[in-house]
């Protein structure tokens, strides 16, 4: 039996690359994938509208004393909304990860000058936030990030360790495994949501967990 059938909380390179259009960045440091035109423009626009109606200042886990570390806004998206439910289901089909392992989808909004400095998505083992946020669902495993619009200038995502710069394009999906092959957190996933220079940037993020969510 295929490993993914045995573990509904896991994805793999083989699973992702089985979908047409998925590309893998050639690196031995981390598993990083992109897929253009994952979501149609109409659905992207609907999600932008949802983010605009209820965004709030973003926060970070393990506060480091830098008040300018993350300056975007965040929107918790209701799974009851049809376009949100459709996106969550589409990401689950692509990743092979069961919806029970998915955090609620989250939207991010960036204005000119806003950014999220270089960070990783996993919780640092041994930290208070790790104990608080990972006790039940476990560590974050995979990140799936979707750009909702073409940014007029700036707003790229930079993976510093592998020197990879990904430009935002409406409907483009970026996915990566937050772990090394042995399951430990992979510091090479360090990434920077760079400053928007002109216009706005809208993003949807889906994080998956080791165990079922909630």
Image (cartoon, rainbow, N blue to C red):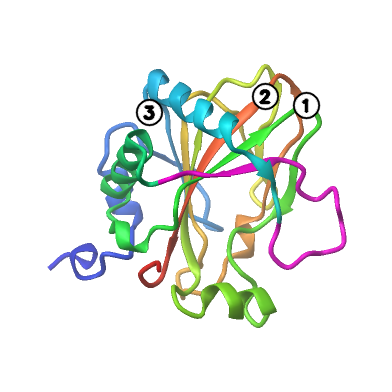
Q: Position of residue 171 (x, y in %)?
A: 45, 27
Q: Which is more toward the observer, 164 or 40?
A: 40
For image coordinates 75% across by 39% down, the residue present is 115
Name above or below for residue 179 compared with residue 84: below
Q: In which quadrant will I find the N terminus?
A: bottom left
Say whether residue 13 is left or right of residue 196: left
Disc number for residue 132 = none
- Specify the principal SS of the magenta part: loop
Q: Residue furthest left?
A: 1
For image coordinates 31% across by 62% down, the residue present is 100
Magenta stretch in the rendered image: 60-78
Disc number for residue 39 = 3
Residue that numbered label 1 is attached to: 112
Q: Are marks 1 and 3 in contact (CB under 8 Å)?
A: no
Name above or below for residue 196 compared with residue 142: above
For image coordinates 64% across by 64% down, the residue present is 187
Q: Position of residue 31 (x, y in %)?
A: 47, 54
Q: First in sequence, mark 3 or 2: give its number.
A: 3
Q: In which quadrant will I find the C terminus?
A: bottom left
Q: First in sequence, mark 1 or 3: give its number.
A: 3
Say whether residue 121 is left or right of residue 47: right
Name above or below for residue 6 compared with residue 206: below
How far, Cα to Cα, is label 2 from label 1? Answer: 7 Å
């Amino acid at each position: 039996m295929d490993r993914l059938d045995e573990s509904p909380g896991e994805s793999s390179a083989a699973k992702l690359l089985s979908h047409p259009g998925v590309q893998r960045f050639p690196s031995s440091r981390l598993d990083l994938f992109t897929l253009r035109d994952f979501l149609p423009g109409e659905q992207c626009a609907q999600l932008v509208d949802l983010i605009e109606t209820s965004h709030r200042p973003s926060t970070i886990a393990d506060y480091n004393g830098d008040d300018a570390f993350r300056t975007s806004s965040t929107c918790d998206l209701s799974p009851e909304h049809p376009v949100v439910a459709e996106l969550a289901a589409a990401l689950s089909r692509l990743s092979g990860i069961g919806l029970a392992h998915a955090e609620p989808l989250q939207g991010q909004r960036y204005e000119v000058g806003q950014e999220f400095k270089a960070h990783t998505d996993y919780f640092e083992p041994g930290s208070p936030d790790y104990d608080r946020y990972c006790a039940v669902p476990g560590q974050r495993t995979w990140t799936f990030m979707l750009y909702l619009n073409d940014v007029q200038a700036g707003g790229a995502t930079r993976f510093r360790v592998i020197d990879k710069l990904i430009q935002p394009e409406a409907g483009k999906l970026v996915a990566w495994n937050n772990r090394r092959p042995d399951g430990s957190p992979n510091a090479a996933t360090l990434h920077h949501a760079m400053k928007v220079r002109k216009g706005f940037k809208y993003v949807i993020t889906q994080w998956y967990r080791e165990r079922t969510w909630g």
